[in-house]
Image (spheres, rainbow, N blue to C red):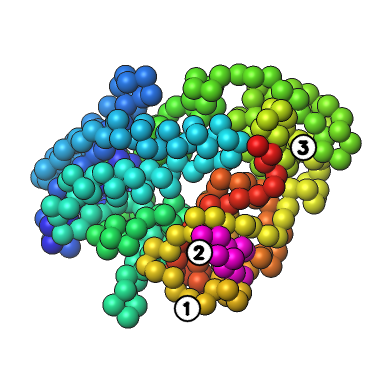
Amino acid sequence: MNIAVLISGGVDSAVVVHRLKEEGHDLHLFYIRIGLDDGSGDCSAEEDIEMCRLIARQYGLPFDVVSLHQEYWDNVMEYALRTVREGLTPNPDIMCNKMIKFGFFEERWGHEFDQTATGHYASTEVIGGTKYLATAVDPVKDQTDFLARISYSQLSHLMFPLGTMPKAKVRETAIEARLPNAFRKDSQGICFLGKINYNDFIKRHLGIRKGAIIELETGRKLGEHNGFWFHTIGQRKGLGLSGGPWYVVKKNVHDNVVYVSQGYSTEKQYGRTLHLDEMHFISGNPWEDVSSPVRITFKNRHMPEFLSGTLTRLNEREYVIESESKVQGIAPGQFAAIYDASSRLCYGSGIITGQNVII
């Protein structure tokens, strides 16, 4: 099979190359390059590209660096900044996968190959002739929530060779194969932002505007923040308040006020109902009638655990999740990924709406 492999310089995508080469496939390696927001280069990208070249050389494979700089800033980061300005919580990684890796790359380069492979921890499953996105065997590393916005045509052209491998096995394979990045640390940055600090990025684009931090229950002013856009619902760290823990539980965008509540057990940081808009099903709606509650599992943020609940359709776009357990930090603007009751198939996602952000 002729396969395009998206590699990053990290150990995961390198092991993808190793596995597919061992299986006898013809591979062409690609690195998607995105510069910094000021148009300059990124030194961490140079390190990544050099690592990719070493891997290509080790396996005797063609390797190309392709640029999607403008497309990334026009689509992913403009979305992120717009969402933050509205007081909501964006997820650039989800939009990066949909718009860049499996959008513009596929349209310009990936479509020339039989499949495109990536180092995502996910898998696929075919049921009744329909291909579904499925979870990885390693629940801690599972990344299906980051893929829950892709289209069916995108999924149809994708393969995820690491879906059957625990992370420990991936690292072990890299060591056994003597890969040059076998001991390289995993990247923790936002998709393509590399070593850029997220708050520095937001500050550069949205600036600083001082506002009050207020205790929700008493109305007492506890301190000041540098702008509501630096804070998200459910946040605990970075508030600079003593006598905590304090959690962000509400934001008033119009007045630039951040409301907090105190204590690990404060009920204000929890909820059981998640209202969703712009519901998207990757492989089609699996239920004929969701006007009656159906049992699901879901994630409202990237985490190993799946939460159980029911999903009900209000209209064509809007759905509501009723969770069996309390959900911490329900942040409007974030995506809720929807799974079947066994947490095996990822059906898609919806955008969380709510009343804890006042526009």
Where is 91 relative to 36, above or below?
Answer: below
Magenta stretch bounds: 310-321
Closest to the observer, 306 or 289: 289
Work out whether 99 lies above or below 241: below
Of the numbered discs in the image, which one, if any, rests on residue 316?
Answer: 2
* Residue 104 vs residue 200, the one in the foreground: 104
Mark 2 vs mark 3, CA separation in Å: 35 Å
Residue visible at 56% across and 31% down in the picture: 85
Name the residue tied to disc 1: 288
Mark 3 belongs to which amino acid? Val
Q: Residue at x 17, y 53 (%)?
A: 111
Residue at the front extreme of this rendering: 315
User: In this figure, what is the number of numbered marks?
Assistant: 3
Can you tell which mark lies on residue 296? none
Q: Quadrant of the C terminus?
A: top right
Q: Is residue 11 visible?
A: no
The nearer-to-camera label among 1 and 2 is 2
Residue 182, x across and y down, in percent:
32, 43
Identity, as a three-letter code, of the amino acid under mark 1: Glu
Where residue 188 sits: x, y (%)?
46, 38
Residue 307 occupies quadrant: bottom right
Relative placement, left or right, of 82 versus 70 is: right
Badge 3 crowding class, 10 Å Cα cut-off, few under 14, some 14 to 19, many 20 or more, is many
Query: Which numbered disc, 1 or 2, marks the residue that appears first in the sequence?
Result: 1
Residue receiving disc 3: 260
